[in-house]
Image (tube, rainbow, N blue to C red):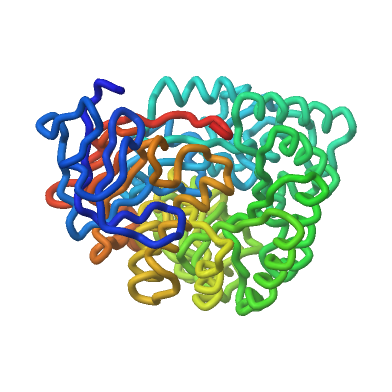
Amino acid sequence: MSDTPAVLLEAGLVVDGSGGPSWPGDVLLQGDRILALGDGLRTRLPAGLDIADVDVVDCRGKVIAPGFIDAHTHDDAIVLRDPLCLPKVSQGITTVVTGNCGISLAPYRTPQSKPPLTLLGADSFKHATMAEYRAAVDAVQPALNVAALVGHTTLRFAAMEALDRPADGDELARMETLLDDCMASGAHGMSSGLFYEEAFAAPAEEVTALARVVARHGGVYATHLRSEMQQIIEALHEAGDTAFSAGVPLVISHHKCAGPANWGRTKETLPLIEALSQRQEIAMDVYPYVAGSTVLREDLVDGVIDVLLTWSDPHPEMTGRLISDIAREWGTTEQEACLRLKPGGACYFQMQEEDVERVIAHPLTMIGSDGLPHDRHPHPRLWGAFPRVFARYWRQRKLFTLEQAVHKMTGMTARNLRIADRGLLRVGTMADVVVFDPETITDTATYDKPHGVSVGVERVFVNGVLAYRGGEGEAKVLARAGRMLTRGR
């Protein structure tokens, strides 16, 4: 038994992450593990423990749940640059899944003149292997855990001189070798971002070959579909067939039907995903907002939807403004303004609320923030996605039960992403735990003021250490006890 003082979370509503019924009771932590679960534990502590030596936390009126797992992040570099990770820990998040949309920091061995996209910060790419990235994470010890995917686009940059074509045989072999090494170093799987220019030329056969490497290691394949707009059905079939052929579980990233012409089409996509789930293991992640956010692309600036600038290198003074207003001020079209603002990023108000609700309520859906921490004026999902699910979609819209909401953030995600010993409150599992007020938990971040600490998250334990304390006074990260996680361990 560890010499670390035990913590008794007493008299709360225990929501264990399984999706099953909650129950009133206690959770006892010691070291980095859950030592006991039950009711009235102070009167029947395990041998060797005395209540005088236990830190007792009164959790009456509060929920005790597993720490939330953010299924979809671009936190690869920010966990190194800002290891306090306040935007995430303050939401109750104890593990982030990095390397999404085909972009990971490792393995970066590029013959290219620039790194893949700018979502992770252009000067962040310096880790030639997953082992190097793991060592960097371990050296800074962030406030939360990191589970890494390997980006298909990063592999392409490492192996190819030109990205506007499929990989040839030698290039594909180099990518397979790099991916095999990353998986052997504990990566949880591979992601792709076929929507983006750097990967769009990759045929399904290229991705399938790499997914077979992932399958040999027992990992998963997550994909930003080739299209989330008019060709979304074809893109879903491609993703499903790729994963099925490779024998690897599939995660559909931030599922949406984007653009006004596609609103309502979740009535088509969700039945298709359900049909695919009858032949293969499949899941989705979603963020609880009608706006997406990515780099500036003139094809997404259609003059119909609102587009909010999140950053611009040539015109940083325009950050936080609508591109329609900028175009009016400059006397140009919105697409011309977009070109003048590039490189940059934006929030695109491209979804319909009814579609978001259908996806978020679906039993195959887990929660991911998809936040972009390097944006100057980020999408509010970076700071508020998880509390917003409780406030808007559980309390207000009543789309699911409290137990189902927690399951979408914990047990389901741990299972789908192959994150062992987390996501459930069980004796012997890792002590990643969040205590929150179910009546007040709410996001405060908005599109106008995106840097807002959520309300109602009171305590967050990471590997048994009190990492964050909310409630009265200033919210604060108290300790950095996170780890780089290894697939299946």
Res. 428 image quadrant: top left
Number of numbered discs visible in the structure rendering: 0
Describe residue 458's horizontal placement relative to residue 351 as left or right: left
Residue at (57, 55) in percent of width and height = 296
Between residue 126 and residue 33, name the one nearer to us: 33
Residue for point 31% across, 59% down: 23
Residue in the foreground of this view, choosing between 195 and 375:
195
Q: Position of residue 415 (x, y in %)?
A: 55, 47
Measured as percent of width and height from the top left, residue 364 is found at 58, 62
The outermost residue toward the right is 169
Q: Residue at x 39, y 62 (%)?
A: 21
186 left or right of 236 in image:
left
Give the left or right position of residue 252, taking residue 172 as reference: left
In the displayed structure, would residue 8 be above or below residue 111? Answer: below
260 and 68: which one is in front?
68
Q: Along the horizontal axis of the image, is 198 left or right of 8? A: right
Task: Using the rendered image of the protein, determine whether residue 318 is visible from the camera's viewpoint.
Answer: no
**Residue 46 visible within the image:** yes
> Does residue 213 sit above or below 370 in this rendering?
above
User: Residue 142, located in which quarter of the rendered image?
Assistant: top left
- Which quarter shows the N terminus? top left
At which x and y percent is residue 267? 65, 78
Residue drawn at point x = 25 percent, y = 33 percent: 46
